[in-house]
Image: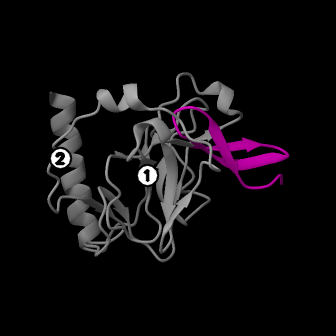
Amino acid sequence: MKKFKNTILAIAVFGLVSAAGVLQAQVIIGDDTGTAANKTSVLLEFANTGDRGIILPAVRTLPAATPGTILLDATDPAQAKVVLYNGGWVDLSSENTADVTAFMATQPTGITEGTAKTVMGATSSSADGVLVLESTTKAMVLPHVATTDDVINPAPGMMVYVNQPGSKKLAVFNGGSWTFWGAAD
């Protein structure tokens, strides 16, 4: 409990200092070091563990969305896919769908989210999402893996960046298979 209280205190102090404009920093999840020293364009970074990813929200109903929204579309759990909103929903699973019925049965239902959200990089945002990154100069760095085979038991909606010489790409897992976006470097 003490560690939790210290974390809350650190976040509160960081928030006050940041709001005063005194401190500019990135958030690193899963580690205490990152690329801030040599990459000032990072707003949110995940530890480079080589075997983990970030899991997108799985939805039963597609929401009204802001361009850049990405999620696991489980409106039909037997045909789930990772999608991106860009004025319309774009299938990132390359039309490969997965049956996530068992997975969705373990997910909560009937949650009312209201207007609650976490905004990073700004004091507010008009974008609707659980986690909104707002910046015109900074981006999110996904967890890096050498190969998706390193990710043990990937969850539906998982994203990683494959950082392998000759094969750098975004990988999304729809619950049944990985789909890759990008080109060899």
Q: Which quarter shows the N terminus?
A: top left
Q: Is residue 80 left or right of residue 166?
A: left
Does residue 65 appear left or right of residue 114 in this picture?
right
Whether label 1 touches label 2, CB < 8 Å: no
Q: Is residue 124 above or below residue 63?
A: below
- Which type of secondary structure does the marked residue at label 2 adopt? helix
Residue 144, given in percent of the width and then of the height, sits at 62, 41
Instruction: Classify residue 6 by image quadrant.
Output: top left
User: What x and y, as percent, mark residue 126?
Assistant: 28, 75
Which amino acid type is marked by label 1? Leu
The residue lying at 43 percent from left, 52 percent from top is 71
Say whether residue 147 is magenta: no
Quadrant containing the C terminus in the rendered view? bottom right
At 60% from the left and 48% from the top, the residue drawn is: 93
Picture disc at residue 71: 1
What is the crowding at mark 2: few (fewer than 14 residues within 10 Å), some, or many (at least 20)? few
Q: Would you say the magenta stretch is mainly helix, strand or loop?
A: strand
Q: Earlier in the sequence, mark 1 or mark 2?
A: 2
Disc 1 on helix, strand or loop?
strand
Q: Tell me the distance, in whole angstroms, between the alpha carbons under discs 1 and 2.
A: 32 Å
Q: Residue at x 35, y 66 (%)?
A: 23
Please state which amino acid type lies under the numbered disc 2: Leu
Please indicate whether residue 68 sits to the left or right of residue 75 in the image.
Answer: right
Q: Judge by depth and name the residue closer to the eye, 169 or 26.
A: 169
Label 1: how many residues lie within 10 Å, few (<14), some (14-19) or many (20+)? many
Q: Is residue 164 magenta?
A: yes
Q: Nearer the viewer, residue 47 or 106?
A: 106
**Magenta-drawn segment:** 160-185
Q: Which residue is mark 2?
A: 9
Q: Nearer the viewer, residue 91 or 117?
A: 91
